[in-house]
Image (cartoon, coloured by chain):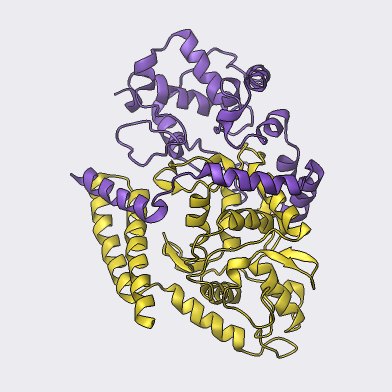
Chain colours: A purple, B yellow
Amino acid sequence: MKTLHTMALVSIASLGLIGGAHAQTAAKGTKAEKAEKVAKVTDADIRQLIESSFTSKGPATVEGVINQDATQKACSQYPDRTKVPAPLAKKVEAAELKQVKYPADSNFIGDWKEGEKIAQNGRGMQFSDQVGGTNGANCYACHQLTKAEISFGNIGPSLYHYGKLRGNSQDVVKYTWGKIWDSNAYSACSNMPRFGHKGILTEQQIRDVMALLLDPASPVNQ
Amino acid sequence: MVTERNTRRAVTAVLATLAAAAAVVAASLSGPALAQDKTAEEIAKYRQMLAEGNPAELWEAAGEELWKKPAGPKNASLEQCDLGKGPGVTKGAYAELPRYFKDANKVMDLEQRLAYCRVTLQGLTQEEALKNPFSSAGKPSDIERLAAFVTGESRGMKMNVQLKHAEEKRVYALGQKMFYYRGGAYDFACATCHAVDGQRIRLQDLPNLMTEKGAQAAYTTWPAYRVSQGEVRTMQHRLYDCLRQQRFPEPAYGSDVITALTMFLAKNANGGTYDGPNMKR
């Protein structure tokens, strides 16, 4: 009942805020393309724009934005990541998979209770954050995880019953670690940050998030 | 006329109020019981606000006063400021911004242009004209008030941003490329969250800014009175805070990256009826 009450309000919110936000991509796409044809801007133009407009602050640096790696550069061509050509996707995924570091002690699973805290925490790496602070993973921003938390986003798939549906074979464990470490290893131009590769989460934090997903006792699997 | 406008504003306010209440309630959920208490509390608050109308109207009125009041070393008002439709024309000016200005040889958004007029007409230094763009407790911002007034002068008009001048085309293209640009610690681009219909962060709906509909819904409702902040926030502030959440470094107020992104969004919103300053969570 309480949930329904809130959900009803949420529906009203959708109506009020994005009422009828349906795509008119066909018409818009043509217009945008036309504009693009008229004016070509180069990577150097963008670099100049960024350098003249931004100042490094806290953990967010100008260098971190200007010095795109190969994957960031390639993915910047595809605002809709479902349009990434298959050969490029394969290339990106192969390169990123090589970057995954698995735990040296083969200890993949930590404490799901800590994992839940990390999944709830959206702090970190913003120019308003301290350098060297503890970052969150902010999983709920994009994923459903537990039944209890109804405030979850939908940019990523639901991870409710993640472990219950997949089991915890060595393959599943290794894949899940790799996906968190470097999301692009399994899905080129993923919207998900590369938590291990970019140093957002520590190895221990990743173990704890692994537990949240895979531990049979975790609320994700209830 | 006045009644008609008030009715329309009231309807908008009802929607915004309910939406805002829902969003606040949803965002502050930590248990169902607590959520319900919060719901009642927030609804009461918004009911009151509804009866009073959109507080942004106070910013508009204060902005109009500032616009007409002689100020600065030259003791001049901003009434002769050319926002693109000739000196002193405020009606409909915002619906055509950003645009190329010959006198500055530059494409400017509203806030860059306001600073330009404060410098050229009132004699402020560039630094003075850009100071305190976002108010904080006890530090109200003249810029937010001026922007509220000028944008209010385009309410009800159709967005009509042109790409006629070569610079306008170039700035649009820059904005588009920037919108797609992935970088920083999280690999985010604007497009990461704003290129697909029906997406949410937590319970917050995200407009698809690549489409006419999505861009119109978002662009035509800024500036807005932010209920959660008790202030009117401008487009510059909206993008500043987007870039923060994108894990990009800090953009300077009035910098060209903001104007480029604004050009991209404003142009995509063409045809939409401008409805700001609005009210949002």
Q: Is residue A90 left or right of B197 when viewed as pictured?
A: right
Residue drawn at the location 21% of the way across and 46% of the way down: A2
Q: Is residue A142 above or below residue B4?
A: above
Q: Is residue B37 left or right of B193 when viewed as pictured?
A: left
Q: Is residue B142 above or below residue A72?
A: below
Of the 4 image quadrants, the one containing the C terminus of chain B is bottom left
Residue drawn at the location 71% of the way across and 33% of the way down: A73
Of all residues, the one furthest to the left in this rendering is: A1
Residue B127 image offset from top left, x and y in percent: 74, 72
Between B121 and A15, the one lying in front of the other is A15
Residue A54 image offset from top left, x and y in percent: 72, 53
Q: Is residue B218 above or below residue A187?
A: below
Q: Is there any visible trace of residue B246 in the rendered image? A: no
How many numbered callouts? 0
Residue A47 image offset from top left, x and y in percent: 78, 46
Q: Is residue A116 above or below residue B270?
A: above
Q: Quadrant of residue B150?
A: bottom right
Of the 4 image quadrants, the one containing the N terminus of chain B is bottom left
Residue B280 image offset from top left, x and y in percent: 43, 61
Of all residues, the one furthest to the top in this rendering is: A170
Q: Is residue B18 left or right of B77 when viewed as pictured?
A: left
Q: Is there any visible trace of residue B41 in the rendered image? A: yes
Residue drawn at the location 79% of the way across and 70% of the way down: B102
Residue drawn at the location 54% of the way across and 41% of the way down: A26
